[in-house]
Image (cartoon, helix red, strand yellow):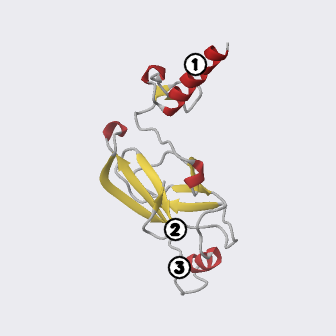
């Protein structure tokens, strides 16, 4: 019995680490906007480590908008988002001060290749806004710029250089 259990444990370890290709199973993922009409998801699926995320990409809303832009998107932030001084950023964005803050919230929209295989070089950017100057803002808002029709990956930066995810 111990030998059988040891073999099972080794098989689970091999499957979990990817060392056993016989344990791999292809899967088709489908989604439906109405709960009835399911359609297959393109090959691009985002896998992320929650410990490394500063906003929740699954909570992005809305998911659709016109190519002319102007759609307000909302990104849910984690409490440990690397904001240096939210109060100064809020005061600057509201026009209460002309002193430029250290933080620079930028939302990037990167066009994916056809079929979800990587990205094109087409990117557009929008200023990220917050709703209050509290020490831990819950959301960042941005108005979409005019975009080419397609599927985009949305990323957020607190310094205008490093984007998550």
Return the residue found at the far front.
Answer: 3
Q: Quadrant of residue 8?
A: top right
- Of mark 1 and mark 3, the one earlier in the sequence is 1
Residue 132 position (above or below residue 48): below
**Which mark is on residue 154?**
none
Q: Quadrant of residue 81?
A: bottom right
List x then y, in percent, for residue 53: 56, 54
Q: Residue at x 48, y 70 (%)?
A: 159
Q: Which residue is mark 1?
A: 7
Q: Is residue 6 left or right of residue 37?
A: right
Foreground disc of the pair 2, 1: 1
Q: Is residue 156 left or right of residue 1?
A: left
List x then y, in percent, for residue 140: 58, 62
**Which mark is on residue 102?**
3
Residue 23 position (above or below residue 51): above
Foreground residue among 114 and 71: 114
List x then y, in percent, for residue 60: 56, 49
Q: Which residue is mark 2?
A: 158
Q: Secondary structure at mark 1?
A: helix
Q: Residue at x 54, y 87 (%)?
A: 99
- Distance between the alpha carbons at the discs numbered 3 and 2: 9 Å
- Viewport quadrant of the N terminus: top right
The crowding category of the residue bearing disc 2, from other C-alpha atoms within 10 Å (few below 14, some 14 to 19, many at least 20), is many
């Amino acid at each position: 019995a111990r030998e059988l259990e040891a073999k099972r444990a080794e098989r689970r370890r091999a499957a979990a680490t990817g060392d056993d290709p016989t344990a791999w199973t292809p899967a088709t993922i489908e989604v439906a906007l109405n709960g009835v009409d399911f359609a297959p998801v393109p090959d691009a699926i985002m896998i992320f480590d929650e410990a490394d995320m500063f906003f929740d990409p699954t909570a992005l809303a809305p998911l659709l908008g016109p190519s002319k832009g102007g759609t307000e998107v909302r990104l849910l932030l984690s409490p440990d988002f690397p904001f240096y001084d939210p109060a100064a950023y809020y005061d600057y964005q509201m026009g209460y001060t002309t002193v430029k803050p250290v933080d620079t919230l930028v939302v990037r929209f990167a066009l994916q290749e056809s079929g979800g295989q990587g990205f094109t070089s087409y990117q557009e950017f929008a200023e990220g806004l917050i709703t209050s100057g509290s020490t831990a803002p819950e959301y960042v808002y941005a108005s979409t710029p005019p975009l080419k029709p397609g599927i985009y990956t949305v990323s957020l930066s607190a310094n205008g250089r490093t984007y998550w995810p």
